[in-house]
Image (spheres, rainbow, N blue to C red):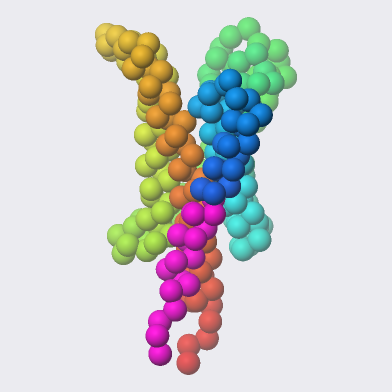
Amino acid sequence: MTPSLSRPAAPLVAGLLCLLVAAAVIVLDAVLNPAAPSLREGGGVESASALLYAVPILLCLTGGNLRRNWMTPLLLAAMALRELDADKRFTSEGVLGIKILTHDTALWEKVLGLVVVVTLLAALWLLLRRYGRTFAAGVASLRPWALYLAGGLVLAAVTKSIDGLGRKLRPLGIDVSEAVNSNAGRVEEVLELGIPVLLAMSAVAALGAASRSARPHR
């Protein structure tokens, strides 16, 4: 009997569909805003990145025990909102930064910042506690879901490191030209697009693996 290609191909198909959706969003933005670059803040690439987080979120909501695994969709939603700069849009200082506590901000902003950060840190800690070893073992055994997830985490780390490159290197005595800083920002936007794609592929692969393991052995 010829082995089916649907199992290993499912995450790749999901990734391709995500890229097609992203391309449609970018093209639509180019049509509606022909004079504006797609890599601008709030442009087509950034909007596509935020929209694609809906895919792994929906997969987590529909394919797992939400009472036990609420941390994953919460953290994914936070990443999507941060992509839309929601962490800075509604308060005088970013809710994820220390300035909202140390600067002269309203009391409600300080409380909001504390609640958001504590909630996200608690969710991350609980997620690592429950699944950290499983993830490490999955990477070591080259499980597709773990490799896709690892790829997404690496991209997230890379994009975080080059975000505001000039500002981060200035305290080290390294001056970065405006052109280099601008190009780093463009690279960051493009790479960020790959994060939700890889997370969606990981979710599809994980759901497939869980489905196969739940089937009774014959």
Give the x, y percent position of residue 56.
Answer: 57, 52
Q: Nearer the viewer, residue 114 or 162?
A: 162
Q: Is residue 13 left or right of residue 100?
A: left
Q: Is residue 141 left or right of residue 28?
A: left
Q: Residue at x 50, y 27 (%)?
A: 39
Q: Nearer the viewer, residue 144 or 122?
A: 144
Q: Nearer the viewer, residue 118 or 156?
A: 156
Residue range in magenta is 1-18
Q: Is residue 168 visible?
A: no
Give the x, y percent position of residue 129.
Answer: 47, 51
Residue 134 is a magenta residue? no
Q: Quadrant of residue 176?
A: top left
Q: Quick check: 112 above or below 76?
A: above
Q: Residue at x 60, y 39 (%)?
A: 25
Give the x, y percent position of residue 76.
Answer: 57, 44
Q: Quick check: 73 above or below 142?
A: above
Q: Is residue 140 visible?
A: yes
Give the x, y percent position of residue 90.
Answer: 69, 21
Q: Nearer the viewer, residue 54 or 116?
A: 54
Residue 5 is a magenta residue? yes
Q: Residue at x 40, y 82 (%)?
A: 3
Q: Quadrant of residue 44?
A: top right
Q: What's the magenta bit mostly, secondary-structure-wise?
A: helix
**Quarter of the image that includes the N terminus:** bottom left
Q: Quick check: 165 above or below 15?
A: above
Q: Residue at x 49, y 54 (%)?
A: 16
Q: Quick check: 190 above or below 151?
A: above
Q: Residue furthest bottom?
A: 218
